[in-house]
Structures are given as C-alpha cells and as structure tokens.
Amino acid sequence: MRRSTMLLTSTGLLAITTAFAFSVSACGGSDQQPATAPSSAYPQQQYPPQRYPQQQYPQQQYPQTQPTAAPTATMATPGPLALPCQNDGACGLHRCNTQFQKCAFPCQSEADCAQGNQCMMGVCAPKMGP
C-alpha cells in the first residue's frame, strides 16, 4: 500500500508541475517592445570639432656610445651555435669574440658576458641580487 501512495503522490506532483509550466509559458508569450520617443522630437546637436594645441616637447640628447669588444685572450672559443658578430651589440647578453667574429657562446666565465651579467651553465644571464 505504501508503494501505491508514493506512486500516486509522484504522479500528482508531476501533473501539477506540468500544468504550472504550461500556464506560465502561455502567459509570457506577449513580448511588447518598449515605446521609444520619435527621433524628430529631439534634434541632434552637432558640436564643432575641437583643435588641440600642438605641444612642444624638449629634445633630449643621448650620448652616442659604441659597444666595445672584450679582450679576446680570456674569452671562450665560440661553439657551432654562436652567432656571427662584429661588436657586442649583436650578441645580446654575451660578448663578441672579435678574433673569431662570433659571439662567445657558450660562455665559460663572466668575461664572456656583457657587463651586469653572469655565466650560468654556459649561458649569460642577468646577475641576481644587489
């Protein structure tokens, strides 16, 4: 008897839920667009384009410095992956070994790295800390 009561209750609950869903969907079918004001009621104002004065910034002079190559006596022999160079600017964090005209890659000491960098496992990296 208990099983039939539960089945009857579940069926009744399903029927009520379905009827409620149909009634809500039937009532919500009339979507009305909100009324908008006619465009001729308010004239559009056009603002004249504004010109901003040109600002003059002072020209800054930066010193022209050429990167210098490190002495070749203490530098590492460039490996097969070393890039060609004529000065340190083309080598990034490494220095240019002008004897071979290639970057000192992989590095063997701090002498193979540009100023402010250190040699870590064959690659020049920025120094850590102060």
Image (cartoon, rainbow, N blue to C red):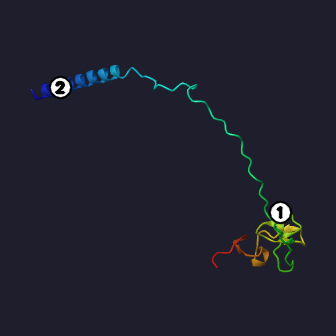
Helix, strand or loop at mark 1: loop
Indicate left or right for 89 with 23 as reference.
Answer: right
User: How many marks can you see?
Assistant: 2
Q: Earlier in the sequence, mark 1 or mark 2?
A: 2
Disc 2 crowd, CA 10 A, few/some/many (<14, 14-19, 20+): few
Residue depicted at 33% across the width and 21% down the height:
27
Residue depicted at 83% across the width and 80% down the height:
74
Q: Quadrant of residue 97?
A: bottom right
Q: Is residue 109 visible?
A: no
Residue depicted at 89% across the width and 70% down the height:
100
Between the C-alphas of marks 1 and 2, the distance is 82 Å
Q: Amino acid at mark 2?
A: Leu
Q: What residue sits right under mark 1 in the picture? A: 83
Instruction: Give the answer, above or below, for where 19 lies relative to 114.
Output: above
Q: Quadrant of residue 91?
A: bottom right
Q: Quadrant of residue 83?
A: bottom right
- Nearest the eye: 130 or 27: 27
Q: Amino acid at mark 1?
A: Leu
Question: Residue 86's spot in the image, x, y percent?
Answer: 89, 67
Q: What residue sits right under mark 2 in the picture? A: 7
- Nearest the eye: 60 or 90: 60
Instruction: Give the answer, above or below, for where 107 lies relative to 33.
Output: below
- Nearest the eye: 42 or 94: 42
Q: Is residue 62 visible?
A: yes
